[in-house]
Image: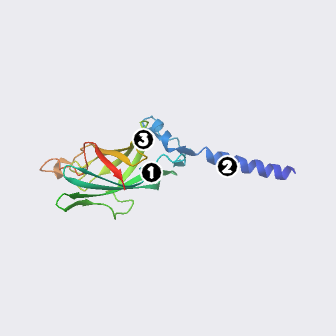
Amino acid sequence: MKKTLLIGLIFLCTICCKAQNILPVEKVIEYRNSETGIPQNITQIKDLNGLLNKFIGIWKGDYNSKNYEFRIVKHTRQSTTRNLSEDELLIRYKIIEANGTVLENTLDLANDSPYVIHGSYLASSGSYVLYYQGKEHKCGQNGDVFIRVLNNTNDLKMKLFLNVAGEMYADLCPNGAVQQMLPTDLIDLTKQ
């Protein structure tokens, strides 16, 4: 009897300890700007409450005479610097001019491509923030992409925009900053 009780307590303790190592995605913002960052005992950042699910899918919209298609998927990334896995969103996109010319297409790129837009954090406002670098990232095509699904739209409408960081390597960009590929003003997107 004591042996069974001891095994049960060890099992329960193991489960409880593992549960303490999971941080919900909505709590990351609390640690983002702290001096210590994500606690070292955290081994998983998980979308426990399904908050990222509303963003998943194919979204389309028009901006400045260009057609945009964004494909958003949920992905679990493993940190290369510590024992931490994190649920995040990835965005691949295709941009087509009104005349049919494809300006940019990242739809077939691997998850680890620097040109796939990678998730960063879920903001307290309900927006999700991702890191973007375009093919001309050394000449200013970089920054944070903000996406937000609109309330009361049955999750069929979303807004997106790029907050340009504009970091540049002046010696590699003799003509200055290049044109941004992603919308720098809000674009309305519809889920397909």
Left or right for 137, reference 91: left
Compare residues 93 and 29 and report the one nearer the observer. 93
Viewer-side label of 2, 3: 3
Left or right for 144, reference 76: left
Q: Amino acid at mark 1?
A: Glu
Residue 97, given in percent of the width and then of the height, sits at 19, 57
Residue 169, relative to residue 113: is it above or below? above
Left or right for 20, reference 122: right
The disc label shown at residue 88, or none? 1
SS type, badge 1: strand
Residue 183, relative to residue 92: is it above or below? above
Q: Residue furthest bottom?
A: 108
Residue 149, given in percent of the width and then of the height, sits at 39, 44
Read off the residue under disc 3.
152
> For residue 166, which quarter of the picture?
top left
Q: Amino acid at mark 3?
A: Asn
Compare residues 91 and 111 and report the one nearer the observer. 91
SS type, badge 2: helix
Residue located at (42% from left, 41% from top): 152
Separation of marks 2 and 3 at Cα, in angstroms: 38 Å
Read off the residue under disc 2.
15
Q: Amino acid at mark 2?
A: Ile
The answer to whether residue 157 is visible is yes
